[in-house]
Amino acid sequence: MKAEEQVQKFKAVFEKVSGEIGKVIVGQKDIVRDTLICLFGGGNLLLEGVPGLGKTLLVRTLSRVLDLSYSRIQFTPDLMPADITGTNLVVEKEPGKRVFEFQRGPVFSHLVLADEVNRATPKTQSALLEAMQEHSTTVAGVIHQLPEPFMVLATQNPIEMEGTYPLPEAQLDRFLFKTLVPFPTETELGIIIDRTTGTETPDVGKVLGGEEILEMKKLVRSVLMSTPVRDYISRLVISTHPETEQASNPTKKYVRYGSSPRGAQALVVGAKVNALIDGRYNIGFEDVLAVAKPALRHRLILNFEAQAEGISPDQIVEQIIKEIPREAEKTTKKQG
Amino acid sequence: MEESMILQKIRELYHRYRMITGWEKIAGGIFTGLILACIYIAFVKVTGFWTGYYWYFIALPIASVIVAFVLHQFKKVSFMDVALKSDEKLQLKEKLSTALEWIEQQKIRTPMFRGLLRDTAQASKEVKESKVFPLEWKSPLKKISAVSVFLVVFLWMPTFSLFTGQEDPKIVRAIQQEAKKIEESAKKLEKKQPKNPANLKKFKKAEKELKKLASELKSPDIKKREALAKISRVQDSLSQDTKQKADMEKMEQELKKALFSGENKDDKGDEDAFGELSKKMQNLAEKLKNEKLSKEEKEQIQKELEKIKNALEQSGQKNENLEKALENMKKGNDKKAGQNLSEAGEQFQQRQSEMDDMESLEELGDELEESQDMISGRKMSGNYPDMEFKEGDGEGEADFGKGSTNKEEKTNQPPSNIYTKRQHQSTPDRRGTYEKLYGATRNEYEKATGQVKGKISKGPTIRSLRSNKQGAPRIGDKAKESPGEVYARYKALNEEALKKEKIPSRYKKLIRNYYDEIDPNQGKETDQGTGKETEEN
């Protein structure tokens, strides 16, 4: 298949999946887009928003649209790691003969919804670390591979902080994107009321299988990136570190720790998917900027001053984008 | 196929970009040069410092253009830079630059790359270089051109005649006649030997400058403004060499008072104070060395020396030999004192020589001043009967220092006459003038009730207010300052102003004479001395 056809197919599939999800989810186009970017980019997604905005519904709908296995884990303070990963149980195979058999946990699904992820203890939260990064889980010294494609979609509520355990930085870094779910507009709310309180419920069909998703993930990786764009991404990420010379002014003032190299990877992967959605073979500066906020916002650890002044990571990312020039000349000189 | 098409397009874009930026730089250079030229004109207009280098006006823009062109040539721009700029302008989302990088670096030809090549080649077909990099006035260029046009209109055009118009031949003739005079002065100076050999260098320098000035003024293309500026420059140079003279003159004035206090000052007015002092010192030295002096005579000499010492101190100077002589006299060591006085006498003689040399240089400055007057039309002479001066010629050229009205200049009268006339008309009787000045106030006080109308102790009285008032006191009250103190204060201010301001030396003399004449102590001294002054008044 020619590259043009592959790109066109990608674009068409993306639109089709978005359309199907749109039958259930009203508005929230950016959220749906970010979710699909994470899916095709091979990353995990953290959805943050107040209760009732359709976070769980979005993930459930996605699982219905995709021909993939789906499991939901409701995180609670008494949830144990084994409840997620599974455990070895003594099973009587033959009469009198008992053996240990691994009972798979809910993590052994293509799509895992970790609902209210910050309600579980850090020990339980960390059970997802290996699964999210290496797509495998180790139980009793045995590594179990997770099915591909694998994706964790976690939700968290930013308001109810009592009895919650904020996700550690290491865990946050493993999410490709963190998406903030906004409150719907007046028109959107009207449609939501109509859809959810009537007799008819919208029906969605399966439009994409696991094999196709894997192919599309492969296509994403083949998108071209020029050196000036790559260098621009590096400059953006380095400028989030307050201790570096290239640190931007808001970084120096408000950031305690900057983004890890995973931030740069997230920018590139996100930009590549974005370019494919647009029907292009290469990424441009605009693609990077389009995914900069969801890719970096959870990777910036703000200091006390920022919290006191009510500065959000999004504001800092905006300022960094304004301050960091594309400096094409400088980049090319380095090459020469 | 696609690769060569893309490369060709990038090359075309590159050449277009270089051409446009080159033109922008040249245009920027022209306008910057114009601004510089206008600033130069403004400088000439404000300061009157005309160098005579007309080519500056053309040279500055040309130099700026050359600099801009050289900078443009040195600034290296790569194909990648142009590709990135084109991507940005055409909203190609880095298609051109990515394709170029893959082509240039011979990276692996993936299906994606081939797709990009086909897409970019398709897009580049529609690209027109002139649309990507149009010849346009960018914001900085707009600002620079606007400023330069503004400056050209308001500064250059009115002075266009500076380098195109011909000077009036009559004025040119006058300039050349003055050039001859200056040349003669230079020759005289060449023959003249300075009294103090240390000043030989200054004399040679002045002579060289005068000769150069004369030769420059002889040029047939010379213009009035240019000639005046050149003369001013030489004048400034001369005044730099005679800077110390003001201090020495002040010292001389003080010394004159001290030396000739008991004699008729008019008779001694033209005497050289330092010369006289030197003689006096030598005489006293001889007396101290050879003769046995009585105690009274010694005291007399000591008093005289003390007076001279005070006079020197008043003018801010010291003479160590004089002080040593006084000390030795007090100790009774007359011979040593005599030796000290002899050395002091030599020093004063040297100073006199210095003064004379400065005087000679200052005279040259006065001559140049006169030449300026002749050229600018401030002063007319029978030497140039064919010269016709238009009304207003030379107005605004003269500068008599801060506070002057320059009214004298506008009358086209010789300045020296005006000053002499004013001096004699306005101050025929200095004592009377002083009394007139304060008499009116005194009369008013005499007529006044002396108290504010109203209830007593409900407000301030005139008496209480008067204590804060400046001016003449009421009859019977004690003055805060004596006339002598007021005079000394004003004289000191005057001396300071004479030093600071640029005033022709002959006017300085007039001003100093005026102050000498209104000196309140002078009258008393004269009364006590000869009494002639009182009789005249």
Image (cartoon, rainbow, N blue to C red):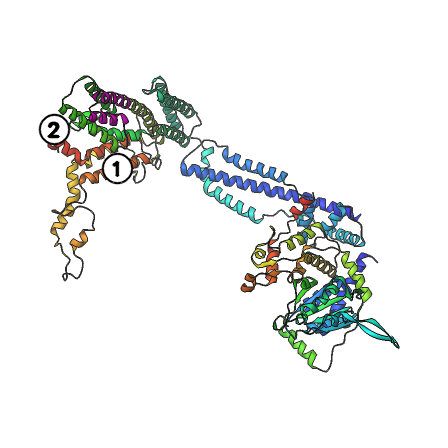
- Using the image, determine if residue B514 lies above or below residue A42: above
In percent of width and height, residue B132 lies at 67, 49
Q: Is residue B340 part of the magenta span, yes or no? A: yes
Which residue position is annotated with label 2?
B530
Residue under the point 55% across and 40% down: B30
Which residue extends farthest front? A96
Mark 2, secondary structure of its residue: loop
| Relative to B261, A25 lies left or right | right
Q: Amino acid at mark 1?
A: Ala
Numbered range of the magenta stretch: B320-347
Q: Badge 2, how many Cα within 10 Å: few under 14, some, many 20+?
A: few
In percent of width and height, residue B139 lies at 56, 49
Mark 1, secondary structure of its residue: helix
Q: Quadrant of the C terminus of chain B?
A: top left
Q: Badge 1, how many Cα within 10 Å: few under 14, some, many 20+?
A: few
Q: Is residue A25 visible?
A: no
Q: Main secondary structure of the magenta part?
A: helix
* Chain of the residue under label 1: B
CA separation, marks 2 and 1? 28 Å
Q: Is residue B402 visible?
A: yes
Which residue position is annotated with label 1?
B492
* Chain of the residue under label 2: B
